[in-house]
């Protein structure tokens, strides 16, 4: 939903960040190279890269945060 980014002053309305869509994907797989149990994790955040829009009655700022990729390997003993 909407969220206030900055409170309005001198009679101006608040600056509000409009709702946006975000799609994330996380894939976890157990692998055993060299008979060692490892967990492999691949993550992609903000796949559709919907723009962030801030308004103060009218649009005042619009930007994209980009897509973030992550790769991790963990070992538990």
Image: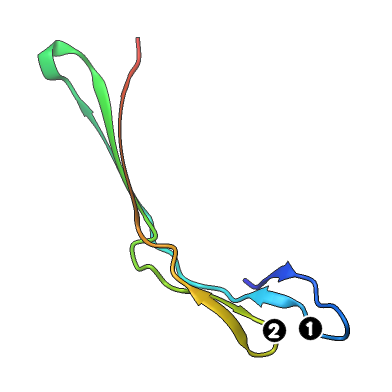
Q: Where does label 1 land, which residue?
A: 13
> x, y (%) of residue 27?
29, 43
Q: Quadrant of the N terminus?
A: bottom right
> x, y (%) of residue 73?
29, 27
Residue at 59%, 76% (x, y): give it: 18
Quadrant for residue 59, please give it: bottom right
Residue at 71%, 76% (x, y): give it: 15
Q: Residue furthest left?
A: 34
> x, y (%) of residue 46?
39, 60
Q: Is residue 18 above or below residue 35?
A: below
Q: Where does label 2 land, which residue?
A: 56
Please count the marks in the image: 2
Mark 2 or mark 1: name the one nearer the start of the chain. 1
Q: Quadrant of the C terminus?
A: top left
Q: Residue furthest bottom?
A: 58
Quadrant for residue 17, please give it: bottom right
Are circles 2 and 1 on residues that touch, CB within 8 Å? yes
For the residue pair 26 and 58, the one nearer the viewer reads as 58
Q: Is residue 26 above or below residue 22?
A: above
73 sits to left or right of 2? left
Q: Is residue 71 above or below residue 55?
A: above
For the residue pair 56 and 34, the one nearer the viewer reads as 56
For the residue pair 3 and 28, the one nearer the viewer reads as 3
Residue at 42%, 72% (x, y): give it: 50
Quadrant for residue 34, please give it: top left
Mark 2 → mark 1, Cα distance in angstroms: 6 Å
51 sits to left or right of 17? left
11 sits to left or right of 48? right
> x, y (%) of residue 65?
44, 63
Dot 2: what SS?
loop
């Amino acid at each position: 939903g909407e969220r206030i980014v900055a409170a309005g002053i001198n009679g101006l309305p608040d600056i509000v960040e409009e709702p946006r869509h975000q799609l994330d994907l996380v894939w976890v797989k157990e692998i055993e190279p060299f008979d060692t149990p490892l967990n492999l994790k691949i993550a992609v955040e903000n796949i559709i890269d919907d723009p962030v829009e801030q308004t103060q009655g009218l649009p005042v700022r619009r930007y994209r945060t980009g897509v973030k990729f992550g790769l991790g390997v963990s070992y538990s003993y």
